[in-house]
Image (cartoon, rainbow, N blue to C red):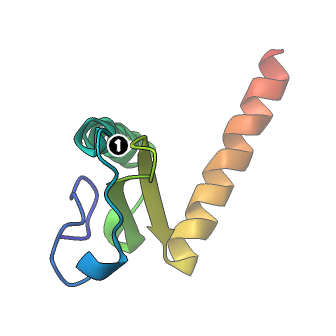
């Protein structure tokens, strides 16, 4: 469950004692937002030709309930992202 689009809730990393729940905070809305962002980012990475085997995306919610996406890359995947980011930045500079 650690691939692109997975929610990251596999029970292995869950530490119930480390979680502080605040009454009235809508953690689920933040998590849902982050889940949608995970799907969008995963689609974008796949569309950019990334080999997603070395990429992990996880949806979570912060202590205030806002969504957050956790991105973990292998060294090879990080280099691929860097190459594509540089190429995109160069294209945008040439257009402006």
Q: Secondary structure at mark 1?
A: helix
Across and down, in percent, residue 8 comes to 24, 65
Q: Which residue is mark 1?
A: 34
Which is nearer the eye, 32 or 89? Answer: 32
- Residue depicted at x 33% and y 69%: 19
> Is residue 15 shown above or below 36?
below
Find residue 72 and report its horizontal and vertical position in percent. 47, 69
- Neighbor class of circle 1 (other Cα within 10 Å; few <14, some 14-19, many 20+) is many
Task: Name the residue nearer the viewer: 51 or 40.
Answer: 40
- Residue at the far top in the pictured view: 96
Q: Nearer the viewer, residue 38 or 95?
A: 38
The residue positioned farthest toward the bottom in the image shown: 12
- 3 vs 83, left or right, is left
Quarter location, residue 43: top left
Residue 20 placement: quadrant = bottom left
Residue at the spot 20% in from the left edge and 84% down from the top edge: 12
Residue in view at x 36 percent, y 59 percent: 57
* Closer to the camera in the image, 54 or 1: 1
Percent across and percent down for residue 31 are 29, 45
Residue 14 visible in the current orientation = no
* Residue at 44% in and 60% down: 70
Position of the C terminus, as image quadrant, is top right
> Relative to 89, does residue 54 appear above or below in the rendering?
below
Q: Residue 2: where, in percent of width, then height? A: 25, 70
Q: Is residue 56 above or below residue 5?
A: below
**49 sits to left or right of 29:** right
């Amino acid at each position: 469950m650690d691939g692109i689009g997975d929610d990251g809730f596999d029970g292995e990393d869950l530490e119930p004692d480390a979680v502080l729940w605040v009454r009235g905070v809508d953690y689920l809305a933040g998590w849902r937002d982050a889940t949608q962002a995970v799907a969008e980012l995963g689609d974008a990475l796949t569309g950019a030709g990334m080999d997603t085997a070395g990429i992990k995306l996880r949806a979570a919610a912060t202590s205030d309930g806002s969504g957050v996406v956790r991105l973990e890359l292998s060294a090879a995947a990080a280099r691929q992202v860097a190459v594509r980011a540089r190429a995109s930045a160069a294209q945008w500079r040439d257009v402006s």
